[in-house]
């Protein structure tokens, strides 16, 4: 089943630019499986244009393929018979067709550049001399983030400064997965495993429980997700073995550089270098306590894609056994007993995403300006929201458990709050507890204490959706 989830903002940006006059050169990039091609196809449905998908093949075959597809699109039999001899003739033809608004999307543009490194220079010449004054709407799309940035946006690229816009397509937010599944608990569990990459979300079967999905869609050797992480990493990285080691170490719980070095046996300089690449590829996040600046030495590293986290936590360590067909054994002995704790690690990020939505609709005790986590010397608080101009602070604990004693959690949260160094003694403090369900909720304390169980979260999220036309 093919379902197009969200992307309202990106579609609106493209449609707005389409209505403008003059040439457009849009760079659209993002990780594999994130939905770039589907976004282009959805956009073209309301515009006039074609998506040309590049392949890893010779320049001659690439030009022949594009000649045939453009010949069909423009009903030009002569082009289909003669074809393009080079990229100059390709762009010359586009120029002839650009007297009226036309979308030409070149998907997987890095494949073309890899085969012919002169292509950006040729495009630069045509763009500067004539294409930018035409009605062409040119989209250059690609899955290799590093190559897209190098070939279109880096200052050494001939196309530097030519793009009229760019869209870095990111994975879906949790809230989009929730609106798709319409079940809060299922959404939290599915998102914790499959993340926000649309292709991974669509691979899951919403009519089956999470354990069945893990078994059938992830752990079976014949499922496409079983090899996909290895494929994505090898396609993007030159020396994947070191990157694999670092990603595996982080998934095991080593979030500081020193711990990663000790675990992998790699030097600090190598780990730092490779972490920087993984951050640029949006595979790893570096997080600092909300009260610290980005240069803080307290920074911790986490896998930013939930499927990667799940894979390196549960599948990669038992890969040989899985390849021998021991899927059910791994599921029952190693995954099921630890699954709730694993989801609990991601529940904090889920609540943060929901809070971002709530904050936009003023559904929290106050409208915050910053949100993050806090930790120091053994103390940590899952979520802290700050309103700088009014010196308001909200402390939140997230418990992926049922029957939570909210009063006890609140007492612990109040005990940790004074350790957070932010306008101490001169601030308004608020407290929040989020859990699957509660056995006891604390007193509201004049609006300074709020609690959400999963039903509460779903109710507020649905209310914001009803009051916001952009979700339709």
Image (cartoon, rainbow, N blue to C red):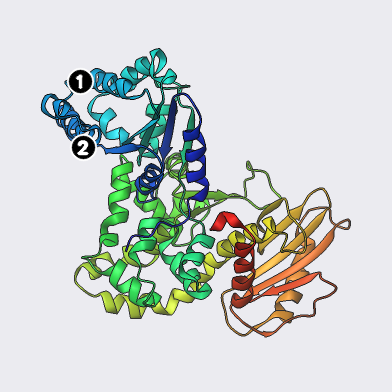
* Residue in the picture at 26% in, 74% down: 327
Residue 447 drawn above or below residue 421: below
Q: In this view, does 15 lie to the left or right of 399?
A: left
Judged by depth in the image, the label closer to the viewer, 1 or 2, is 1
Q: Mark 1 highlights which residue?
A: 86
Image point 18% across, 23% down: which residue? 84
Q: What element carries label 1?
A: loop
Is the residue marked by circle 1 packed among few (<14), some (14-19), or many (20+) residues within 10 Å? some
Query: Is the C-beta separation of discs 1 and 2 under 8 Å?
Result: no
| Front position in the image: 416 or 357 | 357
In the foreground, 332 or 259? 332
| Residue at x 46%, y 34% (from the top left corner) | 18
Point out residue 316 in the picture as x, y percentages from the top left corner. Answer: 32, 62
Q: Which part of the image, by quadrant, shows the N terminus?
A: bottom left
| Up-down relation of residue 225 to residue 245 (above or below) | below
> x, y percentage for residue 357?
63, 59
Mark 1 or 2, nearer chain start: 2
Residue 247 in percent (x, y) is at 40, 53
Q: Mark 2 points at which residue?
A: 56
Q: Can residue 252 be seen in this view?
A: yes
Q: Where is residue 299 in the image (x, y as percent from the top left)?
A: 59, 49
In the image, residue 122 above or below residue 428: above
């Amino acid at each position: 089943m093919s379902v197009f989830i969200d992307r309202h903002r990106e579609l609106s940006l493209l449609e707005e630019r389409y209505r403008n006059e003059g040439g457009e050169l849009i760079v659209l990039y993002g990780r594999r499986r994130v939905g770039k091609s589907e976004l282009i196809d959805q956009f073209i449905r309301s515009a006039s244009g074609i998506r040309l998908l590049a392949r890893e093949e010779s320049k001659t075959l690439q030009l022949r393929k594009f000649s045939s597809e453009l010949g069909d699109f423009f009903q030009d039999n002569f082009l289909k018979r003669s074809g393009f001899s080079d990229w100059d003739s390709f762009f010359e033809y586009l120029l002839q067709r650009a007297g009226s608004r036309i979308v030409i999307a070149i998907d997987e543009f890095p494949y073309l550049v890899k085969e012919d490194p002169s292509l950006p220079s040729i495009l630069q010449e045509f763009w500067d001399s004539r294409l930018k004054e035409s009605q062409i709407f040119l989209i250059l799309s690609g899955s290799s983030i590093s190559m897209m940035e190098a070939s279109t946006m880096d200052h050494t690229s001939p196309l530097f400064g030519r793009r009229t816009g760019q869209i870095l397509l990111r994975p879906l937010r949790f809230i989009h997965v929730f609106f798709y599944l319409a079940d809060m608990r299922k959404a939290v569990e599915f998102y914790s495993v499959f993340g926000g990459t649309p292709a991974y979300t669509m691979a899951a079967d919403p009519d089956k429980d999470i354990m069945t999905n893990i078994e059938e869609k992830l752990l079976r050797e014949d499922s496409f997700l079983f090899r996909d992480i290895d494929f994505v990493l090898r396609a993007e990285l030159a020396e994947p073995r070191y990157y694999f080691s670092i990603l595996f170490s982080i998934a095991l719980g080593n979030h500081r550089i020193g711990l990663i070095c000790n675990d992998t046996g790699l030097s600090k300089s190598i780990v730092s270098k490779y972490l920087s690449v993984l951050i640029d590829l949006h595979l790893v996040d570096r997080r600092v306590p909300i009260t610290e600046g980005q240069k803080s030495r307290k920074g911790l590293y986490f896998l930013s894609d939930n499927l990667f986290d799940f894979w390196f936590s549960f599948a990669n360590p038992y890969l040989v056994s899985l390849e021998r067909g021991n899927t059910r054994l791994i599921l029952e002995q190693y995954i099921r007993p630890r699954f709730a704790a694993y989801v609990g690690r991601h529940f904090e990020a889920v609540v943060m995403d929901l809070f971002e939505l709530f904050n936009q609709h003023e559904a929290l005790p106050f409208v915050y300006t910053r949100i993050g986590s806090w930790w120091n010397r053994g103390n940590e608080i899952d979520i802290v929201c700050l309103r700088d101009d009014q010196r308001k602070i909200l402390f939140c604990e997230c418990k992926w458990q049922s029957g939570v004693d909210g009063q006890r959690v609140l007492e612990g949260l109040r005990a940790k709050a004074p350790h957070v160094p932010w306008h101490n003694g001169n601030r308004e403090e608020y407290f929040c507890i989020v859990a699957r369900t509660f056995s006891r909720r604390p007193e509201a304390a004049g609006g300074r204490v709020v609690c959400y169980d999963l039903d509460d979260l779903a109710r507020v999220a649905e209310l914001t959706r009803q009051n916001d036309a952009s979700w339709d």
